Amino acid sequence: MSALAQLFDRAFAPLEAAVSSKRIPGGVLGIVDSNGHRITRAIGSAQLVPKQRPMTAETWFDLASLTKVIFTTPRILALAEDGVIDLDAPLISVLPDLRQYDAEAWERKVTFRQCLGHQTPFPAVEPIYTYGRDPDLLRAFILQREWRARDLVYSDINFILLGFALERLSGKTIRDMDPGLGFAWSTEPDAAAATEDCTWRHRVLSGEVHDDNCSALQGAGHAGLFGTAASVLDFAHGLLTGASELSTALMRTSLSTTRTHGWERPCKGWSGGALCSPGTIGHTGFTGTGLWVDFDSGKAWTLLTNRIHPTRHFDSGIVQLRQAVGDLVNGL
């Protein structure tokens, strides 16, 4: 048995235990190294209600906030690399109508780099979808709302605004943009891992975006991407092999003790476990997804689960599961 296979078997054990104990319905673990060697394995159920379907290695997942790092961050950094935008310029260089009725508003001073690193005072959570279902009206609402400044926290608003910038520069909505090879904005219900029995859409979601705000906006920069373990590992392998040297360097460049450009970095209690090298970046998604890329060791891993199926209101143990897998991937 190869060293990678032995490592994989160890790292798969916590996922197997989580499924056996019914903490999560199912999941897929995948590991790839810089040479392209990879192993992927599925376990459990892709759906439990109203019908049951098995999880497979080919199951599509609602990647949730992995959209931020797989789709939005690379495109913003590519625009900076091409000189189309300046990361230290305010968003109003592309979105001049942001808080257009108050020239001194703090929102008009927020930069692209600050949004990438979640270094803004936007709120952590905002139920934008409760204000209506008209995507154009909601876009105007987000741009013109007087946001109450908070402490600097991780906020979807940062990437919703970055998504608006991508839309403005391309002349297309997010959903009309190419999501990238192996990715999609939706998929066939029976091909996807089901997420939540949604209380306001009145159905079990499968193959359509779970994120409430993304659904109401009909596409956004913070969520909405679908992919398989294979497509996520393909993306990670591209980072390991340096598809774009400048963009990858910025993804690894710290903006705070917990953040780089778009990504999280190792810190106390972070999702990748305690044994990651300092050269690791990672990100998680609310639906139960995650991706971590360790440039120092030349390997990446993705843990994709449907931990919110059929409800988010349950302690799935996803935080501990991610950390346990990360520690075993890194040799504990």
Image (cartoon, rainbow, N blue to C red):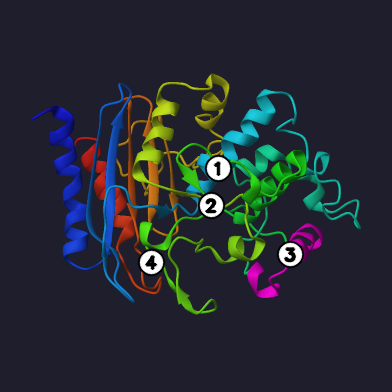
The residue positioned 15% from the left and 43% from the top of the image is 10
Under circle 3, the secondary element is helix
- Residue type, mark 2 in image: Trp
- The mark nearer the N terminus, 3 or 2, is 3
- The mark nearer the N terminus, 4 or 2, is 2
Under circle 2, the secondary element is loop
Q: How crowded is mark 2: few (under 14 residues within 10 Å), some or many (20 or more)?
A: many
Chief SS of the magenta region:
helix
Q: Tell whether label 2 touches label 3 (CB within 8 Å).
A: no
Q: Distance between the residues labelled 4 and 1?
A: 24 Å
Q: Is residue 133 left or right of residue 268?
A: right
Instruction: Inspect this view and state whether residue 125 appears.
Output: no
Q: Position of residue 140 (x, y in %)?
A: 79, 61
Q: Distance between the residues labelled 4 and 2?
A: 19 Å
Q: Distance between the residues labelled 2 and 1?
A: 7 Å
Residue beneath disc 4 = 308
Magenta-drawn segment:
128-147
Q: In this view, does 263 lie to the left or right of 277?
A: right
Quadrant holding the N terminus: top left
Instruction: Inspect this view and state whether residue 325 appears.
Output: yes
